[in-house]
Image (cartoon, grey):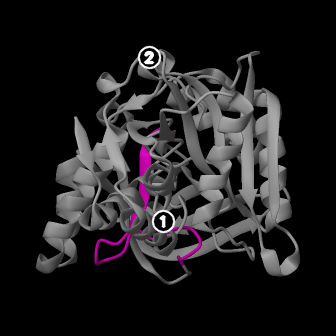
Amino acid sequence: MRRILGPRDVEYAVKGGSVFAAGGGGWADHGRMLGTAAVNAGKPELVSMDEVPDEAWIATAAAIGAPASTTEWEMRGADYVKAVQLVEKELGEPIYGLIIGQNGKSSTLNAWLSSAILGIKVIDAVGDIRAHPTGDMGSIGLANSPEPMIQSAVGGNRSQNAYIEMVIRGATGRISPVLRTASDMSGGFIASCRNPVRASYVKKHAALGGISIALALGEAIFNAEPKGGKAVIDAICKETKGEIIGGGKVTKKAVQYTREAFDIGAVTIGQGPRAVVLHVMNEYMAVDDAQETRLAGFPDVITTLSPDGVPVSVGELREGDDLSVLRIAKRNIPLSSSVTGPSVYPFVEKALGINLTKYALS
């Protein structure tokens, strides 16, 4: 399958990616900027993994940072391109294509501009079909690997002299936190290219078709919008086999930004016995009911929707907002090696003070 990505695909990617953003996943305006720049600059091409030679080099295009609008970040489209060029130079061989670490409001489009300008393919595979807080969760099973990898980071708030370019080598679990520190130092959000591996590895370990799934969902949303918010929510549930597991007014939002470039805390929706608590680490990682029974947990897709069916991120929601909580069960989405290995969970569990492993790996 090959597909030249055009202007309509930009909107599909933003709308579908916003659901898989799981309360984070960047900014819709940033995604539209990336996509529009890409389709105006060239012809970004989406390619399925079955058309990629096994020996081709595939890297991951990513954005690192906290998505809740709590910092003065600056990232330009050129930063994504530069990040790829730095890794390619260090690798010493051409990169054939880019996967993304996760879907999201902007992250679904992270590879498009590099594809348009450098002629690199957008590979229809993702490190995780939904957004997540740590690079390890999108590292296609490399988080615990001792093999030295290459990662780059580019971007930063220019007016505050916070622009950074860096390339680093080492085991993924060791060097990923360095890039997150760079993100914080740059203003909270930075472009990255990471972990070039052979296509044969990607075919075994990535969530294949992850971008096509987001585009199809975006098209379903686009077609339902003229019929109103209920029709949009129904279309999302039908396309994804998702379900609404809670809803009501936001009664409490307690989320704080940390020096590790994470937004951590919890959001409570509803009151009394029907209240639900959404645990946040950049994205929604779990949902508990008022009796502390787990209703949903990573790698389920967990999203809050407005009455109009628009995904509302952690940074956007306010106390008093009326929201529905969508769950797409993990059994209904492709899962990568990143989320089926136990090593990616202890760090997040410690930060949130809850168990994720039991649900995720059951």
Query: Quarter-wise, where is residue 185 in the image?
Result: bottom right
Q: Tags 1 and 2 in contact by the CB under 8 Å rule?
A: no
Query: How far from the left and from the top, in percent, is residue 137?
Result: 60, 36
For marks 1 and 2 on the same chain, the one whose residue lies earlier in the sequence: 1
Residue 86 left/right relative to 10:
right
Nearest-to-viewer mark from 1 and 2 = 1
Query: How far from the left and from the top, in percent, is residue 32?
Result: 42, 71
- Which disc number belongs to residue 204? 2
Query: How far from the left and from the top, in percent, is residue 343?
Result: 68, 24
**Residues shaded magenta:** 298-317
Q: Is residue 244 above or below residue 177?
A: below
Is label 1 in a helix, a strand or a loop? helix
Q: Is residue 90 above or below residue 204?
A: below
Q: Badge 1 is on which residue? A: 34
Q: Is residue 152 visible?
A: yes
Q: Nearer the viewer, residue 184 or 323?
A: 184
Pick the quarter of the image with the N terminus.
top left
Q: Is residue 202 above or below residue 261?
A: above
**Separation of marks 1 and 2 at Cα, in angstroms:** 29 Å
Q: Is residue 28 above or below residue 23?
A: below
Is label 2 in a helix, a strand or a loop? helix
